[in-house]
């Protein structure tokens, strides 16, 4: 792994953020500490300067309260001790204890230095009393000027080299300690980040093992992991569960598609073969008598109608399989079912149709063509499998948030062991007529489920089959 990739990893980012944060804190603490120490050093120098007695220094330099020249001269000494005056001559100045190392004293009158003791050359004279910092000869000095007469000031100053050396030493120590602390924090952050992210690494390895297998039923065990890792593991397991369901549904859909294509070819082959045979017979026998020709043409018409019905049902089933693309609107089910019953009465005039509906309109949200195909196929199934010249009862009602459609016939009914199988595609019950496609009831179940309901079959009061469909009403959850 390259250095840049390591740095951009989660572990590297955590360690980098921790290191930068600690470095910023150490820099701030160091700056505050150094500034505070420098202020204390300056205050210590200022306190030392202010503690020196100005009158004693003035008298030692030969100045008094009245005049810079009024101080008496002690026997055996120049007026200022070791003093440098305007003529450049010097002498002794008091006991050494009065002058700590690096300290100087100057007497100023009229803005000019009259006398000085150990003062560096080229040091500017103060213009007014007070504390100030001066520079001369590459060194810094801190001085205090005091008024000692009408036109005289005494200045005492101290070389700041010693104080600056202590500040510099502290700064260097802080830099060394800070750098060592940053390096230590970087190493500890890297180690602790790796320790904290170890469960995430284990989760990555487990996810890698799952991705390397076709078995989507495998789940990741979070073990004794932090709460965040457990939540992430639960999310991954939920995603795997959804993928497993999706893969299973996709597999089932592919298998159903293969079976559907094979069965459709098989089912269409029979009427196509019959149609081809009859056409060939008519073509090869131009002298066929009118009665036989009429029978052949009628059979061809039935075969063509059967194929058209089957193709229409296949088209509706295919559109139902892509339910998300279906147009949906409010459908008045009472009128729709009434129209379907009237159409079935026209196709089967020998059947007595009983239609029982409430006085008010019943609305559902759905695909009108699919709902009509569902009812048509249910009525066609009842007409075909009921008694000849029998009775079919259609009832429509409301039950809470559902709409209930019941179709009863008086035929032989559906045996209990076949009541679920008959809803499969191209499946026929034992008592179903041979000319059926085996798709009608499959379409009925598909459309019922697409509209939030289900279809069941049991025994009708007359001993035949009762098909019961529940649909979700318009506006209900």
Image (cartoon, rainbow, N blue to C red):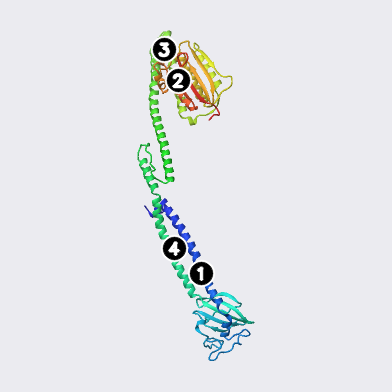
| Mark 3 or mark 4: whose residue is earlier in sequence | 4
Which numbered mark, 1 or 3, is in the foreground of this view?
1
Q: Quadrant of residue 425?
A: top left
Which numbered mark, 2 or 1, is in the foreground of this view?
1
* Residue at mark 1 to residue at mark 3: CA–CA distance: 119 Å
Circle 2: element type: strand
| Mark 2 or mark 1: whose residue is earlier in sequence | 1
Query: Where is residue 234 drawn, in percent x and y?
Result: 42, 41
Residue on which disc 4 sits? 178
Q: Are the two marked residues, 3 and 4, in contact with CB atoms closer than 8 angstroms?
A: no
Query: Where is residue 128 drawn, in percent x and y?
Result: 61, 77
* Residue at mark 2 to residue at mark 4: CA–CA distance: 83 Å
Which one is nearer the viewer's eye here, 275 or 455? 455
| Mark 1 or mark 4: whose residue is earlier in sequence | 1
Q: Residue at x 38, y 22 (%)?
A: 266
The numbered disc on residue 283 is none
Which one is nearer the viewer's eye here, 305 or 391? 391
| Mark 1 or mark 3: whose residue is earlier in sequence | 1
Q: Is residue 136 above or below residue 354?
A: below
- Tell me, yes or no, if residue 9 can be seen here: no
Which numbered mark, 2 or 3, is in the foreground of this view?
2
Residue on which disc 2 sits? 457
Which one is nearer the viewer's eye here, 305 or 174? 174
Query: Where is residue 255 drawn, in percent x and y?
Result: 38, 29
Q: Is residue 194 above or below residue 310?
A: below
Instruction: From the viewer's perspective, tell me whether residue 269 is left or right of residue 467.
Output: left
Residue on which disc 1 sits? 38
Q: Are the two marked residues, 2 and 1, in contact with CB atoms closer than 8 angstroms?
A: no
């Amino acid at each position: 792994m390259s250095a840049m990739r390591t740095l951009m990893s989660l572990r590297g980012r955590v360690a980098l953020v921790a290191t930068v944060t600690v470095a910023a804190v150490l820099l701030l603490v160091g700056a505050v500490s150094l500034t505070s120490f420098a202020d204390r050093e300056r205050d210590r120098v200022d306190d030392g300067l202010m503690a020196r007695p100005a009158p004693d220094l003035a008298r030692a330099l030969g100045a008094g309260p009245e005049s810079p020249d009024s101080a008496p001269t002690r026997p055996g000494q120049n007026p200022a001790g070791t003093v440098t005056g305007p003529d450049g001559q010097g002498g002794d100045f008091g006991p050494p204890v009065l002058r700590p190392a690096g300290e100087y004293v100057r007497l100023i009158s009229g803005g000019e230095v009259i006398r000085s003791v150990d003062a560096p050359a080229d040091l500017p004279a103060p213009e007014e009393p007070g504390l100030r910092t001066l520079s001369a000869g590459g060194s810094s000095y801190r001085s205090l000027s005091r008024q000692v007469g009408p036109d005289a000031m005494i200045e005492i100053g101290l070389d700041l080299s010693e104080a600056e050396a202590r500040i510099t030493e502290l700064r260097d120590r802080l830099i060394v300690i800070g750098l060592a602390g940053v390096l230590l924090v970087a190493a500890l952050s890297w180690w602790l980040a790796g320790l904290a992210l170890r469960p995430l690494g284990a989760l990555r390895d487990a996810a890698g093992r799952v991705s390397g297998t076709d078995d989507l039923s495998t789940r990741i065990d979070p073990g004794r992991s932090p709460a965040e890792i457990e939540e992430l593991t639960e999310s991954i397991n939920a995603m795997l569960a959804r993928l497993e369901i999706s893969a299973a549904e996709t597999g089932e859909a592919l298998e159903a598609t293969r079976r559907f294509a094979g069965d459709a070819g098989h089912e269409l082959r029979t009427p196509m073969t019959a149609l081809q045979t009859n056409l060939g017979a008519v073509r090869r026998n131009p002298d066929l008598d009118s009665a036989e020709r009429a029978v052949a043409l009628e059979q061809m018409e039935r075969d063509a109608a059967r194929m058209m019905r089957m193709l229409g049902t296949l088209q509706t089933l295919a559109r139902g399989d892509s339910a998300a693309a279906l147009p949906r609107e409010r459908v008045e089910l009472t009128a729709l079912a009434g129209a379907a019953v009237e159409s079935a009465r026209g196709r089967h005039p020998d059947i007595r149709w009983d239609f029982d509906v409430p006085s008010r309109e019943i609305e559902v949200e759905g695909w009108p063509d699919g709902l009509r195909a569902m009812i048509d196929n249910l009525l066609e199934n009842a007409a075909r499998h009921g008694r000849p010249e029998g009775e079919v009862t259609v009832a429509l009602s409301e039950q809470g948030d559902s709409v209930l459609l019941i179709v009863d016939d008086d035929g032989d009914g559906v045996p209990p062991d076949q009541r679920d199988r008959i809803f499969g595609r191209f499946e026929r019950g034992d008592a179903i007529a041979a000319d059926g496609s085996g798709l009608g009831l499959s379409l009925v179940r598909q459309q019922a489920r697409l509209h939030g309901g289900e279809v069941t079959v049991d025994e009708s009061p007359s001993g035949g089959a009762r098909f019961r469909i529940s649909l979700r009403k318009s506006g209900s959850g």
